[in-house]
Image (cartoon, rainbow, N blue to C red):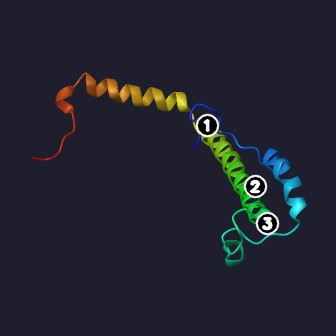
Amino acid sequence: MTYELASQQVSWADVHAFVLPKLKLVGDWPMLGSPAWCGLDDRDRVKWASVLDAAQHWALRLEHGQIVSCEASHDVSSAGDWLKVARDVRRGADYFAARPWMKRGANR
């Protein structure tokens, strides 16, 4: 479940700061979902350390994806003259709106 009205920005550093002290208490843990992990009791703190470690890796993946997406949006924004593109699209729409008989359609 996510909070639909909340910011979706992810901070790996905050997640890491939260989980690191808990991971240090355990010291070593199996990979999440591995046979060794599956064999642990659900209340075992080693099992939960694996979950916390996976959570911080997921947060890192999300944060990286958000950074890359933001950089890409800046690249797209600066790649062209978007005001000119908007004017051209509007001009074309106005042209065909004034000439409905020119509307394209499927061949019958």
Q: Give left or right: position of 83 versus 36.
A: left
Question: Which is nearer the N-term, disc 2 or disc 1?
Answer: 2
Do labels 2 and 1 touch, CB within 8 Å?
no
Image: 61 above or below 66? below
Residue 40 screen position, x and y as percent: 72, 71
Disc 2 marks a residue whose amino acid type is Gln
Query: Of all residues shown, which one is farthest toward the bottom?
Result: 35
| Front residue (pair 16, 67) | 16
Question: Would you name the residue on which mark 1 appears?
Answer: 77
Q: From mark 2 to mark 1, how far is it between C-alphas?
A: 31 Å
- Badge 1 density bin: few <14, some 14–19, many ≥20, Cα 10 Å: few
How many dots with numbers? 3
| Image quadrant assignment for residue 51 | bottom right
| Front residue (pair 108, 65) | 65
Q: Give left or right: position of 44 versus 98.
A: right
Disc 1 marks a residue whose amino acid type is Ser
Q: Kindly state the secondary structure of the residue where label 2 is placed.
A: helix
Image: 74 above or below 30? above
Q: From mark 2 to mark 3, how far is it between C-alphas?
A: 15 Å
Question: Would you name the residue on which mark 3 appears?
Answer: 46
Query: Of all residues shown, which one is farthest toward the left?
Result: 108
Disc 3 marks a residue whose amino acid type is Val
Q: Give left or right: position of 35 versus 45.
A: left
Residue 74 screen position, x and y as percent: 66, 39
- Badge 2 density bin: few <14, some 14–19, many ≥20, Cα 10 Å: many
Question: Which is nearer the N-term, disc 1 or disc 3?
Answer: 3
Residue 75 screen position, x and y as percent: 65, 43
- Badge 3 density bin: few <14, some 14–19, many ≥20, Cα 10 Å: many
Residue 37 screen position, x and y as percent: 71, 72
Q: From mark 1 to mark 3, how far is it between C-alphas?
A: 47 Å
**In the rendering, which numbered label is found on residue 56?**
2
Label 2 or label 1, whichever lies nearer to me, is: 2
